[in-house]
Image (tube, rainbow, N blue to C red):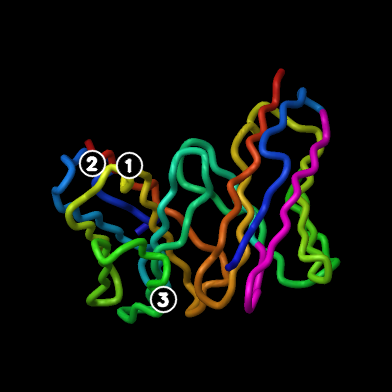
Amino acid sequence: GAGVSQSPRYKVAKRGQDVALRCDPISGHVSLFWYQQALGQGPEFLTYFQNEAQLDKSGLPSDRFFAERPEGSVSTLKIQRTQQEDSAVYLCASSSRAWGADTQYFGPGTRLTVL
Amino acid sequence: EDKVVQSPLSLVVHEGDTVTLNCSYEVTNFRSLLWYKQEKKAPTFLFMLTSSGIEKKSGRLSSILDKKELFSILNITATQTGDSAVYLCAAADAGKSTFGDGTTLTVKP
């Protein structure tokens, strides 16, 4: 595709609900990243995939957060039993290189609001 | 713990002014320093720096990295209202990028 796409763009969840956020990276991009961005702050790293392998999940804040990329393309970030502190914009980025220290192309983000 | 600090937090200038944005970093296994522009949506790429002392330029924007002092600057000359945005700096290792909280630049006509 022309760029990274994410869906939904906006999600409102009641506390305790499970949510799933989708990322479609640029076609052929090897690396995929998830970030969480709170209002007024920079993006915070959550997890990194190289193809289908999740190489780093050190940024996932709790075991309620889970990410997968089963076929090395589309990725899903799942948050179970959402809490108010999970409210943020979730950004996905992809890169053509097999290692991360290169230009990352960001999607528009999913704004999650937990009530 | 990896850390990136940007300064100033915010800056208000008038069109035509020149601005310098600062970024300091402490990242284990550092590979590159990246600058992004964010205007109420996804960050868009500006520069990637991997070598010390080599200035990268794109129009009115330029950036340089000092790997000894763990520091980078982003310069914008002859600012325009369209330059108003949050400028993010990120220090990357082989996998993740650690971002600063950004500098909010406002350019007044």
Q: Which residue is mark 3?
A: A56
User: Residue A100, position in %: x, y?
Assistant: 52, 73
Q: Which mark is residue B4?
A: none
Q: Is residue B9 left or right of residue B78?
A: left
Q: Is residue B12 above or below residue A81?
A: above
Q: Which residue is mark 1?
A: A111
Pick the front one: A93 or A45: A45
Span of residues in magenta: B17-33
Residue type marked 1: Arg
User: Residue A4, position in %: x, y?
Assistant: 38, 56
Residue drawn where x is 15% and y is 48% of the image: A16
Label 3 secondary element: strand
Q: Is residue B34 above or below residue B12?
A: below
Could you say which quadrant of the image residue B7 lies in? top right
Give the residue at the far top of this rendering.
B109
Residue drawn where x is 63% and y is 79% of the image: B29
Q: Is residue B49 left or right of residue A86?
A: right
User: Residue B34, position in %: x, y?
Assistant: 64, 60
Query: Upstream in the sequence, badge 3 or badge 2?
Result: 2
Same chain for the residues under marks 1 and 3 in the image? yes
Residue drawn where x is 67% and y is 26% of the image: B81
Q: Chain of mark 3?
A: A
Same chain for the residues under marks 2 and 1 in the image? yes
Which quadrant, please, contains the C terminus of chain A?
top left
Q: Which residue is mark 2?
A: A11
Residue drawn where x is 49% and y is 52% of the image: A43
Pick the front one: A51 or B103: B103
Asked whether the residues under the numbered discs 2 and 1 touch, taking CB atoms below 8 Å apart as contact, a structural biologist would say yes
C-alpha distance separating marks 1 and 3: 23 Å
Residue type marked 3: Asp
Label 2 secondary element: strand
